[in-house]
Amino acid sequence: MTSEHIVKSFDEELNLLNNTIAQMGGLAEAQMAEAVQALVRRDVDAAARVIAEDKRIDSLEHDVDSQTVRLLALRQPMAEDLRAIVVALKISSDLERIGDHAKNLAKRIGPLTQTPPLEPVHTLRRMAALVQAMIKTVLDAYVERDLDKAGDVIARDEEVDALHTSLFRELLTYMMEDARNITPCTHLLFVAKNIERCGDHATNIAENVQFLVSGETFTDERPKGDESSVVVVEPKTAGAEGSK
């Protein structure tokens, strides 16, 4: 009976850890969604709520840290149980970073409301929708221990990177065409980077789900489509062809 009690107690603690991760993931997903809506609607009050709510995600990450330390110290888990605990710790770190990026995005909304809206916001919205779908899918993959869903998230990261590169070019073009666009476009560049990083963290989680389920580390290099660091936008010069 004592052995059965120990096993049951251990299972309950593992379930609590999984539930904490799921709750943390739900909050991070909601934070991202609300931050994007606040950006589109230019809603500073909603942005302030996103910034304030980040503390809840930080608190849950602390709970995960405490739970994992307790499980490792008192239960001395092995094999699948040990993987579940280590992966939970890594996933909580990525979820906390998603919350931070949502907060950073929200901080840009106040300054953006002081300038006229720009067309690239619609591209940002599309990019954010893709990342939000990745976050939702990877959380489902974690709860369901689903390798196919984890693989789907990893594959979609390349599309996010490609959108980020395209948006980077678009914003640079706006800045070169009109100096008045420099300030709002700079804020939007930071917004875009925060969204792209959320996609990276969702992909990190997917890779950890793969390890959790299979026990193997997938060594294939992650496909990358983000070329914003090497983008060159040629200035438009009147009569450039005739000057040769």
Image (spheres, rainbow, N blue to C red):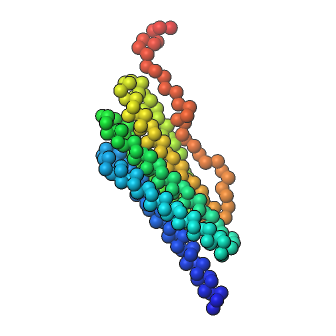
Q: Quadrant of residue 7?
A: bottom right
Taking the image as shown, residue 116 lies to the left or right of residue 218, namely: left
- Residue at image position (38%, 24%) is 179
- When the figure is inspected, residue 216 is found, relative to residue 111, above or below; the finding is below
Whole-percent x and y of residue 53?
Answer: 40, 57
The quarter of the image holding the N terminus is bottom right
Q: Which residue is located at x 51 percent, y 53 percent?
A: 97
Q: Residue at x 43, y 16 (%)?
A: 237
Tell me which corner region of the image, top left, top right, bottom left or bottom right, holds residue 209.
bottom right
Q: Position of residue 122 (x, y in %)?
A: 36, 41
Nearer the observer, 60 or 90? 60
Q: Residue at the location (36% across, 43% down)?
A: 109
Q: Is residue 200 visible in the rendered structure shown here?
A: yes
Image-based side of 69 in relation to 131, left or right:
right
Q: Is residue 157 above or below residue 215?
A: above
Q: Residue 205: x, y in percent?
A: 56, 57
Depth order, front residue of 107/205: 107
Residue 218, quarter of the rendered image: bottom right
Residue 116 at x, y percent in the picture: 30, 34
